[in-house]
Amino acid sequence: MSQNKFFAKGGDKVTPENLGEAIQQAIEIEIATIPVYLYTYYSINRSPDQDAISGSLVQKLVAKGKTAKEASAIALDLSAELMVFSNKAGALIMSVAIEEMLHMALSSNLKQALAGLPELVGKSPSVWPTCLPGHVPPFNIDRAKLSQEQLMTFLKIESPDPLHDPKLLQVIEYTTIGKFYEMIVDCIDNNDLQYRTFLPQLIEGKGYYAQNNIDTVYYDKEHKPHFTNQDDSGDLVYIRDKASAKKAIMCIVEQGEGSKAPGLNPDNSVNCSAVVPGDFDDLSKKELSHFAKFVEIYCTYKTLNARFQSLDIGVKDINDYFVVNVAKNPLTKHYPANIAPVSELLNAVYTYIFVMVEDCYLKSGNTQWEIFMFGIHKSMIFILNSICGDIMKLTYTGPDGEVYSAAPTFEDYPFGLLSSPKSQMIDLFNAAVAVYPTISYLGQRIQDLPDVPLHN
Amino acid sequence: MAIIKYTPNLSLCGGSAPAPSAAPQTCAPASAPSIELHVCMGLNACKGHDRYGTNNCAGTGYCATAEQHNCQTLNNCRGQGGCGLYGDIEQQENPGNNECAWQGSCAVPIQAERFRTLGPERGKSVWLQARKLFVQRMHKAKRSYGDSPFKCGPPQNWLISVLGSYDSCGNSGDKVCSFGFNDPDDHAKKLCEGEKE
């Protein structure tokens, strides 16, 4: 586990002198969550084969003495529950990942206005398991498939209350992400800071951020769509003064932890009795915080597992039905020769998204808009998402002898300085398509990307 | 093998401007007359301007003349993008009415089942919005128009039967599949009547 230092300049308080480092730390906290949530997201098959699930259940139930009619009725109901749950878990995790990207941009706006150019490239965790930079107590964060254990990690990340650590005797740096942001707010409140409004930021009203898309939608048993984010739940904020700076931070904290949500139980277990039912797609209610969304997934998962176990048909974990068997914390260098080049390309695309976001803080007007819409959006939806799906069709045998599906590793790709990142990405594409022609359709999409240089 | 080459002049934004190509020495003869490009059934402004060139009136065409594509940022030019599943509220209000290339936010053609994911009209039919914009345009142009072959746009299953395959973007599963206790016909009827999904 790697634990970055909180402030290079020392101190347990955010001051005008170390404000830039503190906000950079905030950016890196947000970035650290993105590969974790995305990795688990891609492990979920959001549209499993209901007929296969139902057929398997019928066989098991009949073997346990149910009549065919009884077995079919139970199997239909449970398989539909699984179909909804797998899709809902995916939608909720994606809705959180989207907001983490928003938080990264809000923190970057803060840094641009108050301290200097945000640094995003090369800031994804390089050692796994990782931890949140500066979080006390530190806890292991894995890139792992969906499981109750992984959801517990998500809950710790988003916990509104300090984690209960009986061994905690050292000086507290920050115990929740919200408390960390409080320190930044205190500094903003108590000092007459200069706001560098002449520099480009990613601002609202340009279509850069959309709260929902089809990937944050899931269907209930009656196939009615539910929207997991609210249109008014948050947006980019142009940081121009104290009020806008605090508005951006409030958005980050409320979306993450919620304003008054109860946290984990004293023994760090989850209080499932506090789950709020429903999905709040009407305007009179409010969107669930990240913490509450993960509580909802965790508790639904637990209830469904219990229902399956009560049938005594040998189902230990429902994730067998809809979660792809990916390894924990895989690295590209451990993949075989038919997968590693594809993983390298995937990592380059992932890293190039950060390169383009950094560039948006140096460009304004139409140039910024084009980089964002035709570079970042296109990369996320049409290249990264596509290649994530494609790589998972490949399998390999791990050191433990088990067969795994290859997974996106979301490692920072070390672009060299001798040629442009885009030209290097094209070389990687050519190497990848040579071993995996399935991805040939991505060539034109990569070719269409803007040609953006490295900065920091 | 789909090898591609890096060319700095291909940079469309964010880098230096492409070098202008040399002017042609002679004008090539015009090919067949162009037809207006539109994104779906029932959105053609002129006779003979559907995919088959056989429709007899505005608004009655069977299929898109714009290039088929399956998601955001893949439309070729102005007015050739679908919308609905990605993009911001403004984009979702303007299916087939985008200003420039790559500004559409979803697939073309627009299946009847597609709904909007943002804004006050969230959950409502995308095709009906596209048809509404088309009707407004016809009124402004003082032109008559006919009924669409399907009242609420082409159903996905029909598109698959005609096109061989059809894919719009997204990971949340197929809207017309039958899991759970789904009644696709009832959903389609409600969407067609302007109700929210």
Image: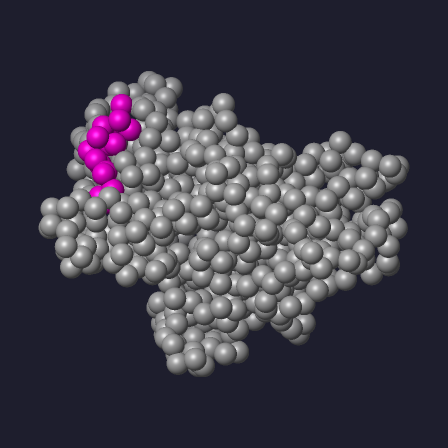
- Choose between B111 and A262: the one closer to the eye: A262
- The quadrant of the picture occupied by the N terminus of chain B is bottom left
- Choose between A437 and A107: the one closer to the eye: A107
* In-image side of A10 versus A88 (left or right): right
Q: Residue furthest left?
A: A68
Note whether B149 is above or below B67 in the view shown.
above
Q: Is residue B81 visible?
A: no
Residue at the image position 44 percent from the left and 58 percent from the top:
A147
Note whether B153 is above or below A316 in the view shown.
above
- Choose between A56 and A411: the one closer to the eye: A56
Residue at the image position 86 percent from the left and 59 percent from the top:
A9
Note whether B64 is above or below B138 in the view shown.
below
- Residue B97 in the image: state x and y as whole percent: 41, 34
Q: Quadrant of residue B157?
A: top left
- Choose between A279 and A104: the one closer to the eye: A279
Q: Is residue A329 visible?
A: yes
Q: Quadrant of residue A450?
A: bottom right
- The quadrant of the picture occupied by the C terminus of chain B is top left
Residue at the image position 82 percent from the left and 61 percent from the top:
A8
- Residue A242 in the image: state x and y as whole percent: 79, 34
Total marks in image: 0
* In-image side of B56 versus A185 (left or right): left
Magenta residue check for A353: no
- Residue range in magenta is B177-193
Residue at the image position 71 percent from the left and 50 percent from the top:
A175
- Residue B96 in the image: state x and y as whole percent: 38, 36
- Residue A173 in the image: state x and y as whole percent: 77, 53
How is the rendered protein coloured?
A: one colour
